[in-house]
């Protein structure tokens, strides 16, 4: 299963480094290309692609994203998208970010994309 994580600006490097330091996610997170939307000249949002093979990796990603959001002091917004194109947007004020991400990604009938 794949998940896309979009985050803008200077927060991309911080999130990438944070996720790279998570033992349960090593080798599962790679940079990707943000889709260019109509009217845009190029993406201002950077994307990380998570290739998650089992529930343990999903749990590790959900926990890491929730913890990382909790450490932010600036306005930051994450968009997490599953393989079916369903997504959630989270910010530093989001309640239960870990549970929300797990619910999005832990869907047994989801097809890999």
Image (spheres, rainbow, N blue to C red):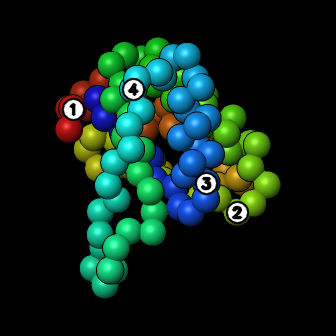
Residue wearing tag 2: 75
Residue wearing tag 4: 28
Image side of residue 22 versus residue 106, left or right? right
Where residue 64 sits in the image (x, y, percent)?
Answer: 60, 31
Q: Residue at x 47, y 15 (%)?
A: 56
The secondary element bearing badge 3 is classed as: helix
Seen as rendered, the residue at the extreme bottom is 39
Instruction: Please report contact status of discs 4 and 3: CB closer than 8 Å, yes or no.
Output: no
Residue 59 seen in render: no
Disc 1 to disc 3, how far (Cα)? Answer: 27 Å
Residue wearing tag 1: 112
Instruction: Please report contact status of discs 2 and 1: CB closer than 8 Å, yes or no.
Output: no
Q: Residue at x 20, y 32 (%)?
A: 111
The secondary element bearing badge 1 is classed as: loop
The secondary element bearing badge 4 is classed as: loop
Q: Quadrant of the C terminus?
A: top left
Residue wearing tag 3: 11
**Rendered image quadrant of residue 39:** bottom left
Tell me which label, 2 or 3, sits earlier in the chain: 3
- In the image, residue 99 above or below residue 35: above
Q: Nearer the viewer, mark 1 or mark 3?
A: 3
**Rendered image quadrant of residue 96:** top right
Label 2: few (<14), some (14–19) or many (≥20) C-alpha neighbours in 10 Å? few
Tell me which label, 4 or 3, sits earlier in the chain: 3
């Amino acid at each position: 299963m794949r998940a896309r994580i979009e985050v803008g600006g200077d927060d991309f490097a911080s999130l990438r480094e944070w996720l790279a330091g998570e033992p349960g996610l090593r080798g599962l997170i790679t940079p990707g290309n943000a889709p260019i939307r109509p009217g845009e000249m190029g993406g201002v949002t950077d994307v990380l692609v998570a290739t998650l093979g089992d529930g343990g990796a999903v749990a590790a990603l959900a926990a890491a994203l929730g913890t990382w959001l909790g450490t932010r002091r600036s306005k930051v917004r994450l968009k997490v998208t599953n393989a079916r194109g369903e997504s959630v947007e989270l910010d530093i004020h989001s309640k239960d970010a870990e549970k929300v991400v797990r619910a999005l990604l832990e869907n047994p009938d989801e097809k890999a994309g």
